[in-house]
Amino acid sequence: MAARRTLAGFLDDLASSSPAPGGGSVAALAGALGSALTAMVCNLTIGKKKYAAVEEEMKKILVQAEEMRALFTALIDEDTEAFNKVMEAFGLPKDTEPQKALRAAAIREATKEATNVPLEVMKHCIDALALTQQVAAAGNLNSVSDAGVSAFMLHAAVEAAALNVRINLNNLNDSEFVGWKTDEMDSLMNTSRMMLEEIQGIVADKLKNG
């Protein structure tokens, strides 16, 4: 499991000639990194007298951020597994017409699953960005730059995951599924861009005014 490997081991796998883990797993990793930074800001706020008024809020956000981190970590491997299923489907026999039909159906279903995994990354990123926005606004001022980095990582995860959604949709001829997932992807991207702008506005203001 890639998520259980050392960072160096994961990077070695990523740099190898194997197509998985690939960009989808990196998108999930970016989400995990962003969530970990949000948790860090919470931990650096909790217990500080100056931030006693928001301590309970930060404790709740911390729990949620850690849940997000766990979800993204699991999605690192889920993306690889989904890609491997697509490859397995392409490897099915195609000597007879029934075999061809079975293979085509398997490829279609595996590709849909491979589309849904990065979409899950995108959805969770929106939830994670909402947490980041809260810690940017109310968390330890000395860590506001970390909240800003968290937002950038989470938005990068959204943009990266969207690329994986697109490439899978390009391989499907199910117009209803493609249209539905494209609309979902576009909505998530627009929301993420808006949230990133809002968070970076908060960060910039706090860095300027303290």
Image (spheres, rainbow, N blue to C red):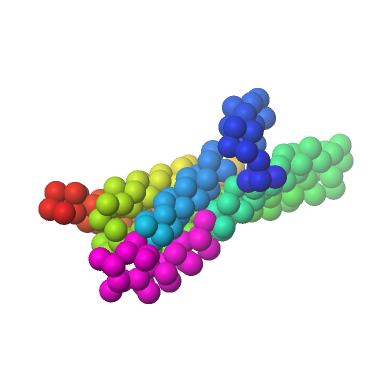
Residue that lies at the very extreme toward the top in this rendered image: 17
Give the dominant element type of the magenta stretch: helix, strand or loop: helix
Residue that lies at the very extreme toward the left in this rendered image: 209
Point out residue 148 in the picture as x, y percentages from the top left corner.
Answer: 31, 49
Q: Quadrant of the N terminus?
A: top right
Point out residue 18 in the picture as x, y percentages from the top left corner.
Answer: 67, 30
**Which of 99 and 184 lies nearest the eye of the viewer?**
184
Q: Tell me: 178 left or right of 152.
A: right
49 relative to 129, above or below: below
The image quadrant that residue 59 belongs to is: bottom left
| Residue for point 57% across, 57% down | 70
The reply to whether residue 122 is in sight is yes
Residue span colored magenta: 45-69
- Is residue 49 in the magenta section? yes
- Is residue 121 in the magenta section? no
**Which of 123 and 49 lies nearest the eye of the viewer?**
49
**Which of 100 and 154 lies nearest the eye of the viewer?**
154
81 relative to 46, above or below: above
Residue that lies at the very extreme toward the right in this rendered image: 96
Point out residue 98 in the picture as x, y percentages from the top left corner.
Answer: 85, 47
| Residue for point 27% across, 52% down | 142
The reply to whether residue 174 is in sight is no
| Residue for point 59% across, 32% down | 8
| Residue for point 58% across, 52% down | 73
Q: Tell me: 99 left or right of 57.
A: right
Point out residue 104 in the picture as x, y percentages from the top left corner.
Answer: 73, 46
The total of numbered circles placed on residues is 0
Q: Quadrant of the C terminus?
A: bottom left
**Which of 99 and 119 lies nearest the eye of the viewer?**
119
